[in-house]
C-alpha cells in the first residue's frame, strides 16, 4: 500500500512563507512544481520545467501575469501555462507560440496555507469550479495559523500517517525531563469513532476539567479529532470562551520522503506572546516523531513483515482500508464508499 494518492489537494507551504514576486521549487508526489505568488498576491503552481530546454522555471522571475525563464527569457502565463513571449523571435517568424504550454496545477490559498491539486495526469485541463475545495477547517472562517511548523520525514507517507494517528506511542516517544519522565504510566482509554467523508472522527466529547492547559479555553472544553484522506488530521478544541485547532497535513515528496505541515490556530487573546515557547514545544514534539521514524527506517531496510493490532492500531487499519477503497473507486470510476463503521475503540496509553 505504498501507492501515492492523486486527484487530491495537498498542502504545499504555509502562505506566509511565499512573498509577493517569489517562487519556490517543490517536489510533490514526485512531480517538479514551482509555486509562486504574483505581485498582485495571486498564487500559482506549474510544472517546474521549461518546455524549451528543460531548466526549472523557478530559477526565473515573475513579470505581471507570467513567469519568465532564466535561460532564454520565454514567458508563460501563470493562469493557463501558455507561452506569451519568445524574445528571440523576429516579427516575421510564423511560430504559433500560444501552442507551447507548461502544465498548470490548480492552486488555492485557504486559511493561510497554499494548496495544490495533484491530478492523475497533470496535462489534463482541469476546471477549478469542478473540483472539490481544498480542506477547510470548520468554524475557523478566514483565520490564518498563529503558528506553522514544517518537518521532513525520510519515510513513505504511510508510515508518517500511521504515526500521526497512532494513539499508543505517546508515553514512549513523547517524553522529556519536564513532562512524562520516569516509567510510562498507562491508562485504559475508551473512545467513540464514526465515519466522516473520506475518513473517520473521534466523536466530540467533554474533556475532564482536570486537563489544565485546556482551561485556557473555558470551563467546558470539547475535543474532536478528524482523520481524512489523503493525510489530514484536524484536532479541534472548543471551550465555552475560546477555540483552538491543531491541523496537520502530510504531503509526499516522492515514494520515500514526505513533509508534515502543522498549523496551530487559536482565538485565545494574549497567547501570541508565548509563540516562541509554543513553537519550541511543537518542534520538539514533531522532532520526536521524526527521530523515531529515522530509527524505524533502519529496520524497514530489511523489508520485514509488520503487524497492526486491535484496538491500538485500528485507526491505522482504517487508514489502509480507506486508501484501498479510494484506489478501487478511482480504478472503477465510481464514487468512494466509506468502509468505516461507527465503533468504540479501547486501548491503553
Ligand atoms: S530553456 Fe527556458 S527559455 Fe530556453
Ligand atoms: Fe507522535
Image (tube, rainbow, N blue to C red):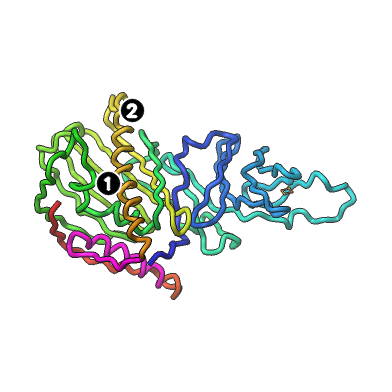
Label 1 to label 2, Cα distance in Å?
Answer: 21 Å
Note whether residue 240 is visible. no
The residue labelled by disc 1 is 235
Left or right for 61, reference 94: left
Q: Percent position (x, y) of residue 212? A: 14, 34
The residue labelled by disc 2 is 276
Badge 1: few (under 14), some or many (20 or more) residues near its Cα, within 10 Å? some
Left or right for 161, reference 187: right
Residue plotted at (9% across, 50% down): 187
Residue plotted at (47% across, 61% down): 7
- Disc 2, SS: helix
Whichever of labels 1 and 2 marks the residue nearer the N terminus, that label is 1
Badge 2: few (under 14), some or many (20 or more) residues near its Cα, within 10 Å? few
Q: Is residue 58 magenta?
A: no
Question: Residue 153 has which mark?
Answer: none
Residue plotted at (40% across, 58% down): 156
| Quarter holding residue 309 | bottom left
Magenta extent: 303-328
Front residue (pair 161, 14): 161
Note whether residue 230 is visible. yes
Q: Percent position (x, y) of residue 66? A: 67, 43
Left or right for 46, reference 9: right
Q: Residue furthest right?
A: 92
Amino acid at each position: 500500500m505504498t501507492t501515492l494518492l492523486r486527484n487530491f489537494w495537498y498542502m504545499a507551504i504555509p502562505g506566509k512563507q511565499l512573498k509577493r514576486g517569489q517562487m519556490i521549487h517543490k517536489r510533490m508526489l514526485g512531480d517538479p512544481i514551482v509555486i509562486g505568488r504574483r505581485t498582485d498576491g495571486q498564487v500559482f503552481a506549474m510544472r517546474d520545467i521549461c518546455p524549451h530546454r528543460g531548466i526549472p522555471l523557478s530559477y526565473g522571475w515573475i513579470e505581471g501575469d507570467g513567469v519568465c525563464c532564466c535561460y532564454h527569457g520565454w514567458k508563460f502565463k501563470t493562469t493557463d501555462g501558455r507561452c506569451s513571449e519568445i524574445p528571440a523571435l523576429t516579427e516575421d517568424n510564423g511560430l504559433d507560440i500560444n501552442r507551447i504550454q507548461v502544465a498548470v496545477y490548480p492552486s488555492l490559498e485557504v486559511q493561510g496555507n497554499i494548496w495544490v491539486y495533484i491530478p492523475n495526469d497533470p496535462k489534463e485541463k482541469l476546471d477549478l469550479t469542478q473540483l472539490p475545495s481544498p480542506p477547510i477547517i470548520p468554524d475557523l472562517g478566514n483565520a490564518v495559523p498563529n503558528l506553522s511548523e514544517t518537518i521532513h520525514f525520510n519515510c513513505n507517507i504511510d508510515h508518517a500517517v500511521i504515526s500521526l494517528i497512532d494513539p499508543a506511542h505517546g508515553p514512549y516517544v513523547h517524553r522529556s525531563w519536564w513532562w512524562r519522565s520516569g516509567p510510562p504510566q498507562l491508562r485504559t482509554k475508551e473512545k467513540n469513532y464514526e465515519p466522516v467523508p473520506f475518513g473517520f472522527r473521534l466523536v466530540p466529547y467533554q474533556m475532564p476539567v482536570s486537563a489544565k492547559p485546556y482551561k485556557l479555553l473555558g470551563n467546558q472544553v470539547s475535543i474532536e479529532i478528524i482523520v481524512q484522506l489523503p493525510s489530514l488530521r484536524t484536532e479541534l478544541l472548543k471551550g465555552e470562551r475560546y477555540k483552538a485547532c491543531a491541523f496537520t497535513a502530510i504531503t509526499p515528496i516522492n515514494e520515500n520522503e514526505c513533509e508534515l505541515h502543522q498549523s496551530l490556530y487559536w482565538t485565545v487573546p494574549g497567547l501570541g506572546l508565548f509563540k516562541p515557547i509554543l513553537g519550541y514545544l511543537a518542534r520538539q514534539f514533531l522532532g520526536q516523531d521524526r527521530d523515531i521514524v529515522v530509527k524505524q527506517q533502519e529496520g524497514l531496510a530489511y523489508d520485514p513483515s509488520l503487524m497492526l493490532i486491535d484496538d491500538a492500531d485500528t485507526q491505522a487499519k482504517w487508514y489502509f482500508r480507506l486508501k484501498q477503497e479510494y484506489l478501487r473507486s478511482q480504478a472503477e470510476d465510481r464514487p468512494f464508499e466509506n468502509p468505516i463503521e461507527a465503533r468504540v475503540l479501547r486501548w491503553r496509553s
